[in-house]
Amino acid sequence: MSSDSTKKQPRISRHLLWEYDISTFDFGKSKRVVIERVIERGTLEDWREMIRYYGEEQVLSVARQSRQLSAKDKGFTEIFIHSTLLHAA
């Protein structure tokens, strides 16, 4: 598997990262910020892009360790990441 820096940059809704300059934003180094914001406020397409870029295990790991996310958001992530809705065409 390739490292985050060699993957195509995810197309995450820009309003989720409004305070950053996306042209210089490092999605690899800032994965915690991206993952937490997508979980809290992202669209279905944001979720799909997040999973494509970081992978399910990284997303789950960040969610489980997050101090930012509520217990509800963490529980939702555990269920939703394996749902048929997320992986439907």
Image (tube, grey):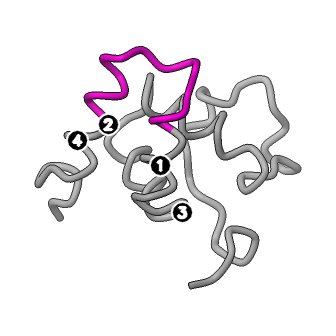
Contact, mark 4 vs mark 2 (Cβ under 8 Å): yes
Q: Amino acid at mark 4?
A: Phe
Density class for disc 1 (Cα within 10 Å; few <14, some 14-19, many ≥20) is many
The answer to whether the residue labelled 4 contacts the one labelled 3, judged by CB atoms less than 8 Å apart, is no
Q: Is residue 25 left or right of residue 45?
A: right
Q: Is residue 47 left or right of residue 8?
A: left
The span from disc 4 to disc 3 (Cα, nearest Å) is 17 Å
Q: Between residues 5 and 14, which one lies in front from this camera angle?
A: 5
Q: Which residues are magenta?
A: 63-77
Percent position of residue 64, x then y: 45, 35
Separation (CA) of disc 2 from disc 1: 9 Å
| Type of amino acid at the residue the image marks with label 1 | Val
Q: Residue at x 85, y 38 (%)?
A: 21
Q: Marks 3 and 2: in contact by CB < 8 Å?
A: no
Which is nearer the eye, 79 or 89? 79
Question: Residue 37: horizontal and vertical position, in percent?
Answer: 54, 29
Q: On the image, numbered disc 4 is attached to which residue?
A: 80
User: Which of marks 3 and 2 precedes in the sequence?
Assistant: 3
Mark-to-mark CA distance, 4 and 1: 12 Å
Where is mark 2, residue-wise?
77
Question: On screen, 3 above or below 89?
Answer: below
